[in-house]
Image (cartoon, rainbow, N blue to C red):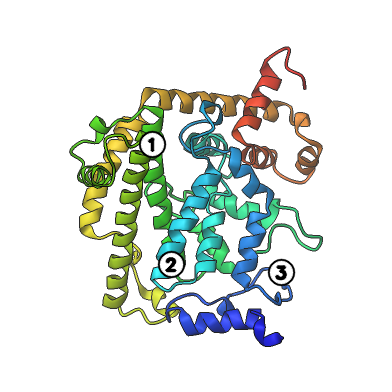
Amino acid sequence: MADKMLTREKIEKNEHDILASYAMKSSETKGRRQDEPEHSYRSAYQRDKDRIIYSTAFRRLEYKTQVFVNHEGDYYRTRLTHTLEVAQIARTIARALMLNEDLVEAIALAHDLGHTPFGHSGEDTLSDLMKDHGGFDHNTHGLRVVDVLEKRYPNFCGLNLTEEVRRGIIRHSTPFDQKRMGDDDIPGPYLLEIQVVNVSDEIAYDNHDLDDGLKSGLLNGEDLKGVSVWDEAVLFAEKNSSSDTDEGVRRAQIVRYLIDKQVSDIISSAAKRIEKLDIRNVGDLENVNETIIAFSEDMNKKRSRFKETLEEKLYKHYRVVKMSKKASRFLRSIFEEYCKNPGQLPLQYSKRIEKEEKFRVICDYMAGMTDRFALDQYKMFYEPYERV
């Protein structure tokens, strides 16, 4: 009977037999901050993935938004749908490059746990409010979430994740998502699995914001005409549809083409870099000073024009700017109100102020809010007939 069961030991053996020599193996993890017995049927990274999915912070991603705030419509992407899309893209790349899919998925599912309500506008606002009180960025806060703020186990705070997943959270970086609060304290190489999640986030972010922008009407085909990757995608959609094809289906085919082209480019160019740099094991990554999981020069040029168009036509659209500024005003008002009278905080937070710095406690509370909860808090403070 035992031969018919996939035990942790067999999973670890399969990783060594199947994965690339430079993939991070779960049996070689640097471990957890708190020692725990290993699980019989799950690898260390599979356990991390499951812990993240069951966390409160992960569930809250459902009502945290990226570009469109929650009440603008329930068909736009949220942090949760974005996270799942990043994980899907990252698994595809990891599988093709024979990297550790379980580690990649765990990092992908955790990469946005530290995000505030109201997307990047919320992060920028909290960062400004906290600039004299230790600062704020969502990577550092994400690590704080999994190390300290989650309460699920009797013997330790946080989720007690492996060092590799923790490293993936703190080192998450894309052109729109830079860590701001100094160097991390988790030594180790820039794992290829971490790099895969970083580039997958970028692919998902750009192409799914494009999808939402077109769906909302803030973007249209004319805005993107002449952008080579867009023109290629439109031609693909036209060849694979007819005159009576639904517009939503055509849009889905365009986005599908764009993602597939970029993912294929990443896989091909990364494989060439691995060979050129003669990467043979994880230790070799310590001496590499360039990003390995990256686009080709040709795709970078194409994406540059594409991203510039999104920036000008979508992110700077007056409606998006209005939403961002409104969200910032909400958060500033709530933050100031709690600073003036922290006794209004829930008991588990107000009690912490007896031992911890007031501004950090308030920041922890507000960073964990969903869009709609933050809006409710604002109404509670400033609308006279709103029930408290």
Q: Amino acid at mark 1?
A: Gly
Residue 195 showing in the rendered view: no
* Label annotation for residue 259: none
Q: Residue at horizontal 71%, vertical 77%?
A: 40
Residue contact at pointers 2 and 3, CB within 8 angstroms? no
Element marked by disc 2: helix
Q: Amino acid at mark 2?
A: Ala
Residue contact at pointers 3 and 1, CB within 8 angstroms? no
The spot of residue 134 in percent (x, y) is 58, 45
User: Disc 2 or disc 3, which is closer to the eye?
Assistant: 2
Say above or below: 206 vs 187.
Answer: above
Residue closest to the far top: 384
The spot of residue 52 in percent (x, y) is 63, 57
The CA span between labels 3 and 1 is: 49 Å
The CA span between labels 2 and 1 is: 30 Å
Q: Which residue in the protein does label 2 denote?
A: 94
Q: Amino acid at mark 3?
A: Gln
Q: Residue at horizontal 67%, vertical 60%?
A: 51
